[in-house]
Image: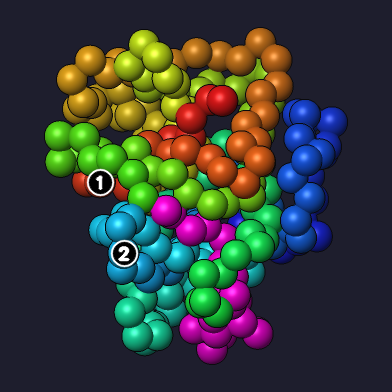
């Protein structure tokens, strides 16, 4: 993920201007996503959490990330790669009493992990998938000509935007899906932008840590 001043071409896709929080960072296809998670007690458990992302981290920080001593209650998520053409992440207003940033890696100046998502709860499907409701202000963009991977049950559709590091996107077709769900691949005729106005819904593969966002 690049920092808030990272290069991008706004003309490549339409971005919903309603999302106007401070930009924490912009990831482009292939960028690694470094994420720390702290589970929260309450009615949303075990899904409810606060999630922090490092916009300044890159491939050279992988070893430090995987060996870092984490603050109490935190765990590191598996490294993921950005599958969307661009993912623009903005600050969310409610930290739920938790810090807004964390200083974990000595090699990265400042408090490099910033609060970027707060899953509120969700539904587990067949013990292998989770449908998650979360607070996260982000815009996902794809260009015309991009190939996208979709899954759905005939009533809702989700598009893959993050995949576990080292995954060949073609293998997404082989994932065992919940009963009644199907996978499809299509090439976009026009730019596509997903912006859920701070309240996206995601589909999570618990075994492979891929993330899919619902088309609203």
- Taking the magenta stretch, the answer to whether it contains residue 80 is no
Q: CA distance from mark 2 to mark 1?
A: 21 Å
Using the image, determine if residue 18 lies above or below residue 181.
Answer: below
User: What numbered label is drawn on residue 42?
Assistant: 2
Residue 182, visible in the rendered structure = yes
In the image, is 57 to the left or to the right of 165?
Answer: right
Using the image, determine if residue 64 lies above or below residue 134.
Answer: below
Using the image, determine if residue 145 lies above or below residue 102.
Answer: above
**Viewer-nearest of discs 2 and 1:** 2
Q: Residues within 10 Å of mark 1 (few under 14, many from 20)?
A: few
Q: Position of residue 174 (x, y in %)?
A: 24, 25
Q: Residues within 10 Å of mark 2 (few under 14, many from 20)?
A: few
Q: Residue at 61% of width from left, 15% of height from top?
A: 188
Which picture quadrant has residue 25? bottom right
Helix, strand or loop at disc 1? Answer: loop
User: What numbered label is drawn on residue 181?
Assistant: none
Which picture quadrant has residue 18? top right
Looking at the picture, tell me which residue is in the foreground, 4 or 106.
4
Using the image, determine if residue 137 lies above or below residue 4.
Answer: above
- Taking the magenta stretch, the answer to whether it contains residue 106 is yes
In the rendered image, the residue lying farthest to the left is 126
Q: What span is in magenta?
A: 100-120
Residue that label 1 marks = 206
In the rendered image, the residue lying farthest to the front is 43
Looking at the picture, tell me which residue is in the foreground, 197 or 188.
197
Q: Residue at 34% of width from left, 38% of height from top?
A: 131
């Amino acid at each position: 993920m690049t920092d808030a001043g990272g290069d991008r071409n706004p003309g490549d896709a339409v971005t919903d201007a309603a999302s106007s929080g401070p930009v924490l960072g912009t990831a482009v296809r292939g960028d690694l996503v470094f994420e720390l998670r702290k589970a929260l007690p309450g009615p949303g458990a075990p899904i409810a959490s606060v999630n922090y992302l490092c916009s300044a981290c890159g491939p050279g920080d992988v070893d430090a990330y995987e060996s870092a001593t984490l603050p109490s209650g935190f765990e590191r998520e598996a490294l993921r790669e950005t599958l969307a053409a661009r993912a623009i992440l903005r600050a969310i207003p409610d930290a739920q009493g938790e810090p807004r940033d964390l200083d974990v890696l000595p090699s990265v100046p400042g408090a490099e992990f910033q609060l970027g998502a707060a899953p509120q709860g969700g539904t587990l499907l067949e013990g292998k998938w989770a449908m998650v409701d979360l607070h996260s202000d982000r815009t996902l963009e794809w260009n015309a000509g991009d190939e996208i991977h979709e899954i759905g049950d005939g009533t809702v559709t989700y598009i893959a935007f993050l995949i576990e590091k080292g995954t060949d996107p073609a293998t997404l077709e082989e994932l065992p899906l919940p009963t009644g769900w199907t996978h499809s691949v299509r090439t976009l005729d026009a730019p596509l932008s997903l912006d859920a106005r701070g309240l996206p819904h995601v589909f999570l593969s618990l075994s492979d840590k891929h993330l899919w966002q619902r088309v609203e």
